[in-house]
Amino acid sequence: MKVILPILFIGIAVVAFIFGVNPWYNDVSALRSDILAYNTALDNSAQLKLAEDSLIKSYIGIKQSDKDRLNSFIPNSVNNIQFILEVERIANLHNMPIKDLKFEAKKQTSSNSGNTVVAQVGVDDKPYGVFPLEFSTEGTYDSFVLFLKDLEYNLRLIDIKSISFTVPDSVKVTDGFDPNIYKYSVKVETYWLK
């Protein structure tokens, strides 16, 4: 009997550990790992807050004129009329009138049901939009090169997609004919943030 009683107590202790203490111990271990993960996330959020504060300080330190220039570089809206007027202003500086102006507005269809707007169909997921513009102009080669240089140094981001030119027909000699005046067709694109 002396041997059976200690073995019985050991058996009861093992059963109590398996069914009573072990599940609690596993819960505590899981909670400890959760606490460790939350503490790591808390440390990361503190570092992100410091980075955010640093960026806000840097942004506040930017001069308003530089912010305006950046907004001109890639504006927050299409503002296609302003862009067309800017290209025309640059062309007029070089006595190269803009003709045959063509632009393609991106088609964005949406349906409005009640107060909610359904997602637009056919819209790409890029964070920027593209505004293509095509036009023709006439002038000397030197004037055209200067016109392109001014487009290059313009504040607004412009990509020239294609240039073609037509040499005047020397057979058609008429009054006021200048064989150095070429006709240029230009396709450009500009961008804006959505």
Image (cartoon, rainbow, N blue to C red):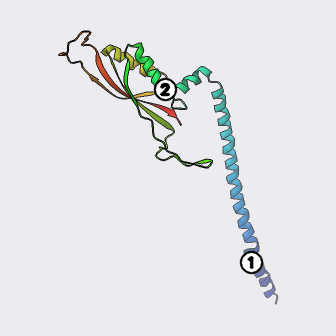
Mark sitting on residue 100 = none
Q: Nearer the viewer, mark 1 or mark 2?
A: 2
Specify whether 115 is left or right of 122. right
Res. 159 image quadrant: top left
Q: In front: 152, or 19?
A: 152
Which residue: 24% across, 13% down?
179
Which residue: 74% across, 77% down?
14
Image quadrant occupied by the N terminus: bottom right
Residue farthest bottom in this picture? 1
First along the sequence among labels 1 and 2? 1
Image position, residue 75 (x, y; %): 53, 29
Res. 134 image quadrant: top left
Q: CA distance from mark 1 to mark 2?
A: 83 Å
Q: Amino acid at mark 1?
A: Val
Q: In front: 147, or 30?
A: 147
Image position, residue 182 (x, y; %): 28, 18
Mark sitting on residue 14 = 1
Residue 118 visible (yes or no):
yes
Q: Is residue 23 above or below residue 67?
A: below
Which residue: 73% across, 67% down?
25
Residue farthest left in this picture? 171
Q: In front: 176, or 27?
A: 176
Q: Is residue 77 above or below residue 62?
A: below
Residue 63 visible (yes or no):
no
Q: Are marks 1 and 2 in contact (CB under 8 Å)?
A: no
Image position, residue 171 (x, y; %): 17, 16
How packed mark 2 is, by other alpha carbons closer than 10 Å (few <14, some 14-19, many 20 or more), is few
Mark sitting on residue 81 = 2
Q: Amino acid at mark 2?
A: Ile
Specify whether 110 is left or right of 144. right
